């Protein structure tokens, strides 16, 4: 059985420049996760930045081959993660102490392809109730090009004290 060190050496040996750049970024962000700069492995792997104020939340990721699909454009699922994260970050910032917001519905309309070096999703609240919130998220490029629009419903639930782990079968 090979060790992780042997596997890593094989990966490095077989890597081209693009592979090495992606791996270097990934490992750098993994270290930042270990140091507490990222709260989740997903945020670290996508190199997310978040800015939230009273009215909105903006989540940004780099547009690199790491997020591209087989036709070399940003994967729709990654854009969904970006929109859901922007809306969820804002929803959670508005939750009363001891509660958290989880996505119950997400509807996305993809309008065109993102082409700039970074992709940003901005979210704002449409309605906030005691048990649910409805938010809207949009991805616009700096040049004004509208990439995607989404709405999401979030259910407000009691916050768990322990981390959630997958059930073993």
Image: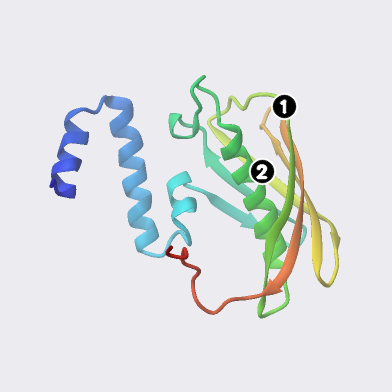
Circle 1: element type: loop
Residue 67: % across, % down: 49, 34
Residue 71: % across, % down: 52, 19
Give me the disc on residue 121. 2
Residue 15, by quadrant, is: top left
Residue 3: % across, % down: 14, 49
Residue 116: % across, % down: 57, 28
Give me the disc on residue 87. none
- Seen at 72% across and 27% down, the residue is 145
Nearest the camera: 51 or 135? 135
Q: Residues within 10 Å of mark 2 (few under 14, many from 20)?
A: many
- Seen at 31% across and 39% down, the residue is 23
Nearest the camera: 68 or 158? 158
Q: What residue is disc 1 on?
A: 145
Q: Is residue 140 above or below residue 154?
A: above
- Seen at 55% across and 35% down, the residue is 118
Q: Quadrant of the C terminus?
A: bottom left
Give the Cα distance between marks 2 and 1: 13 Å
Q: How many numbered marks appear?
A: 2
Q: Is residue 71 above or below residue 158?
A: above
Q: Residues within 10 Å of mark 1 (few under 14, many from 20)?
A: some
Furthest toward the front, the residue is 169
Nearest the camera: 42 or 22? 42
Q: Is 169 displayed left or right of 34 in the figure?
A: right
Q: Are marks 2 and 1 in contact (CB under 8 Å)?
A: no
């Amino acid at each position: 059985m090979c060790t992780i060190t042997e596997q890593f050496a094989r990966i490095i040996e077989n890597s081209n420049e693009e592979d090495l750049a992606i791996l270097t970024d990934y490992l750098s962000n993994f270290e930042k996760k270990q140091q507490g700069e990222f709260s989740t492995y997903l945020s670290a792997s996508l190199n997310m930045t978040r800015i939230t104020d009273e009215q909105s939340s903006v989540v940004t990721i780099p547009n690199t081959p790491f997020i591209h699909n087989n036709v070399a454009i940003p994967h729709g699922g990654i854009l969904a993660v970006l929109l859901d994260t922007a809306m969820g970050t804002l929803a959670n910032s508005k939750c009363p102490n001891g509660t958290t917001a989880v996505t119950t519905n997400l509807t996305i309309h993809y309008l065109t392809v993102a082409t700039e070096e970074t992709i940003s999703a901005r979210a704002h609240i449409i309605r906030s109730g005691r048990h649910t919130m409805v938010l809207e998220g949009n991805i616009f490029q700096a040049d004004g090009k509208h990439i995607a629009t989404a709405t999401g419903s979030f259910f407000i639930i009691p916050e768990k004290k322990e981390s959630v782990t997958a059930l073993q079968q």
